[in-house]
Amino acid sequence: MKVDPIFPLGTKVKADGVHEMEYGMIVKTPPNSVSEYDTIVLWDTPEVDDYEEWVGATFLEAADPRHTFKYIDDDGKQINRNKKR
């Protein structure tokens, strides 16, 4: 696995979405992921496993560390999400 040190594990990040700012957290890449990197963005959405590879992405920036997520806890675990069918 490759490591990109720009955003360490646990960093809260944001990206300018289509209609509003989107927030997420840098988390350890799940074992079933096809990503070749150690970390991946878990987006704060109601969808389960809303991950996106971020390494080298110019759209991403650090968010305020005090930002409160709706669907991610402070340990980067998914909470209150829709279950996959």
Image: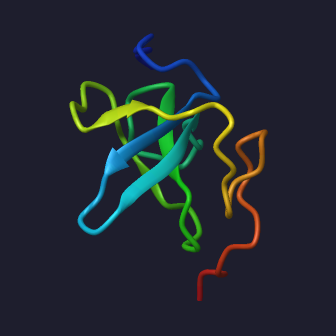
Residue 20 drawn at (x, y percent): 34, 63
Which is nearer the eye, 28 or 58? 58
Residue 80 drawn at (x, y percent): 75, 72
Question: From this viewpoint, which residue is outermost toward the top?
Answer: 5
Position of residue 36 in the picture relative to residue 28 (left or right): left
Residue at left 40%, top 16%?
2
Which is nearer the eye, 35 or 44? 44
Residue 65 location, quadrant: top right
Position of residue 79 in the picture relative to residue 83 (left or right): right
Residue 40 drawn at (x, y percent): 47, 37
Position of residue 46 in the picture relative to residue 19 (left or right): right
For the C terminus, the image quarter is bottom right
Which is nearer the eye, 17 or 47? 17
Residue at left 69%, top 50%?
68
Residue 44 location, quadrant: bottom right
For the N terminus, the image quarter is top left
Rendered view: 47 above or below 16:
below
Position of residue 38 in the picture relative to residue 61 (left or right): right
Residue at left 58%, top 73%?
46
Residue 17 drawn at (x, y percent): 29, 58
